Amino acid sequence: MIVRKLRLQRGWSQDQLAEMSGLSVRTIQRIERGQNAGLESLKSLAAVFEVDFNELNSGATMTDLKTPQNAEARGYSLDPDRQSSLSGLSSEEREALRSVRDIKGFYVHLACYAVTIPLLIGINFIWTPERLWVLWTALGWGLGVAAHGLNVFEVINLFSPEWEKRQVEKRLGRRL
């Protein structure tokens, strides 16, 4: 549906939209994933977005998308994770969304590192202070985090879209 696109255009979070519409965050998430929305939910969203109810209601339902041909013809992906974020978006918006997700993934990776390594340092000093095994863990994982950051922020692009395309073509047995 176009709910996600309208929400992102306005710069609202799912929480903000839920609060303004009187719906739960879970309902907003389900609607953005393309699941059928109730009449009252669509009316609430139409009022919040100040659009015609029919504009929200005219989106394809999941029953319309059961075959790959119908889904692709309407510009939808059958992968539920991708469908929620890519339906109704331009290629530029899709690329921006992919980039933001990559950056988010990096920050999650960095946060895990920042939380786990101090815990491991504490464990190392409590149980085996004579052997600093935690340095190897911190160094190895730290290099992984650094490589992830360099790739996400495109300082070093190890696996570019061109590389991905070549690999897909190779797996399909095609020549470029």
Image (cartoon, rainbow, N blue to C red):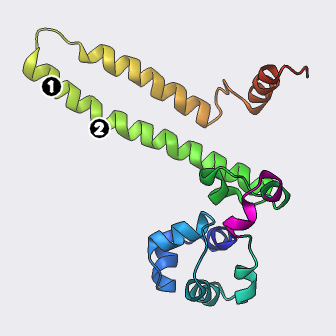
Q: Tell me if residue 88 can be seen.
A: no
The percent coordinates of residue 111 (x first, y second) are 37, 41
63 left or right of 143? right
- Picture disc at residue 43: none
Residue type highlighted by circle 1:
Ile
Q: Residues within 10 Å of mark 1 (few under 14, many from 20)?
A: few
Disc 2 secondary structure class:
helix
Which residue is at the far left? 126
Query: What residue sits 60% from the left and 49% below the top?
Result: 100
The N terminus, quarter of image:
bottom right
Identify which residue, 24 or 101, lies in the foreground: 24
Question: Between marks 1 and 2, how big is the CA–CA gap?
Answer: 13 Å
The C terminus, quarter of image:
top right
- Residue matched to label 2: 115
Q: Quadrant of residue 125?
A: top left
The span shown in magenta is 61-70
Q: Tell me if residue 122 can be seen.
A: yes
- Picture disc at residue 123: 1
Query: What residue sits 36% from the left and 37% below the top?
Result: 112
- Residue 7's place in the image compared with 75, above or below, is below
37 in the magenta segment: no
The percent coordinates of residue 121 (x first, y second) are 20, 25
Query: What residue sits 64% from the left and 73% below the top?
Result: 3
